[in-house]
């Protein structure tokens, strides 16, 4: 019988791999110069309804408290505040906090408490709901991240996390280089890591299909990007020919740039504290 992967260890390896890739071009604050563009991307995405906002908002109201881990541009915190809930936003990036505070001011969410510490080091009181949207990818210790969420949550924990496109170019590329299809921490790894911890989470994949697409000026640029994401050195490697074949199968030339297929989809995972245990 084939041995089940250690999903917690796989999460750690994937986070470390992504960190190594980012350190090739390290700004002191990863969001410096990019926080405003992120806010605009979220604003465009939120022009369309999605199930994640609907579900999480249904848990909230006056007298309910929610902790927003990695609050980013503040869109979620402002949404939560609009329900009348008591909101705490944890955001360690100074560049992102500036955007967050502007978003809260524009939305009239003046009562949101903002904490500048990273998670899980942040010292905060217990909240009814503890929520994290796409801010877990830099935490190599997934168990510690989730256990801190559970210690802080009175009722419920929730993670909003990206879903990889099955059979997409990065799925294929990771399979060639890593021996499994996961190029970065994602929903599949997280869900199985939660099961490994004894947590059986509810799942709702967002109603909207995959959106967004990377582009590159040349296929050689795309190859360098893929190799960097998979922690291969930029020089020649034994994988180059097979990786280029993957890119030629999947990328399409549009207006002079090589465009990837849509890659962005999210799933909401949530569970009641002390329940949904296997």
Image (cartoon, helix red, strand yellow):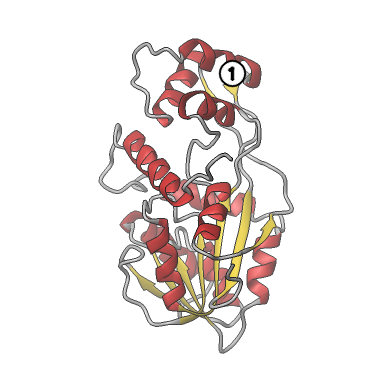
Q: Residue at x 66, y 60 (%)?
A: 203
Q: Position of residue 222 (x, y in %)?
A: 49, 21
Looking at the rendered image, the quarter that the N terminus falls into is: top right
Q: Position of residue 168 (x, y in %)?
A: 63, 30
Near-viewer residue (86 or 36): 86
Q: Badge 1 local density, few (<14 within 10 Å), some, or many (20+)?
A: some
Asked whether residue 253 is in view, the answer is: no
Q: Residue at x 69, y 59 (%)?
A: 204
Horizontal side of residue 260 vs 93, given as left or right: right
Q: Is residue 178 above or below residue 125?
A: above
Q: Is residue 14 above or below residue 56?
A: above
Q: Is residue 234 above or below residue 101?
A: above
Q: Residue furthest left?
A: 28
Q: Residue at x 58, y 20 (%)?
A: 258
Horizontal side of residue 209 vs 97, given as left or right: right
Horizontal side of residue 251 vs 137, given as left or right: right
> Total number of numbered labels?
1
Residue under label 1: 246
Asked whether residue 7 is in view, the answer is: yes
Q: Residue at x 64, y 37 (%)?
A: 165
Q: Position of residue 251 (x, y in %)?
A: 62, 21
- Where disc 1 sits, the SS reads helix
């Amino acid at each position: 019988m084939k041995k089940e992967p250690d999903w917690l260890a796989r999460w750690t390896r994937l986070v470390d791999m992504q960190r190594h890739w980012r350190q090739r071009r390290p700004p002191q604050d990863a969001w410096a110069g990019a926080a405003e563009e992120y806010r605009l991307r979220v604003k465009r995405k939120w022009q369309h309804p999605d199930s994640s906002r609907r579900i999480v908002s249904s848990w909230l109201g006056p007298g309910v408290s929610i902790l927003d881990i990695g609050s980013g541009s503040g869109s979620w915190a402002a949404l939560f505040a609009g329900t009348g809930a008591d909101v705490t936003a944890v955001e360690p990036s100074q560049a992102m906090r500036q955007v967050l505070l502007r978003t809260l001011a524009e939305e009239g969410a003046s009562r949101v408490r903002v904490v500048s510490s990273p998670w899980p080091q942040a010292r905060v009181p217990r909240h009814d709901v503890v929520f994290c949207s796409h801010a877990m990818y830099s935490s190599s210790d997934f168990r510690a991240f989730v256990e801190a969420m559970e210690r802080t949550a009175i009722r419920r924990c929730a993670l909003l996390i990206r879903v990889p496109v099955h059979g997409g170019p990065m799925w294929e590329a990771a399979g060639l280089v890593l021996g499994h299809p996961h190029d970065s921490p994602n929903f599949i790894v997280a869900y199985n890591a939660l099961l490994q911890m004894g947590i059986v989470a509810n799942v709702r994949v967002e109603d909207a299909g995959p959106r967004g697409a990377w582009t590159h000026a040349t296929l050689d640029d795309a190859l360098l990007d893929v190799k960097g994401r998979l922690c291969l050195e930029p020089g020649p490697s034994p994988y180059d020919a097979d990786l280029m074949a993957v890119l030629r199968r999947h990328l399409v030339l549009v207006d002079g740039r090589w465009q990837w297929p849509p890659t962005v989809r999210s799933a909401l995972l949530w569970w009641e504290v002390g329940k949904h245990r296997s």
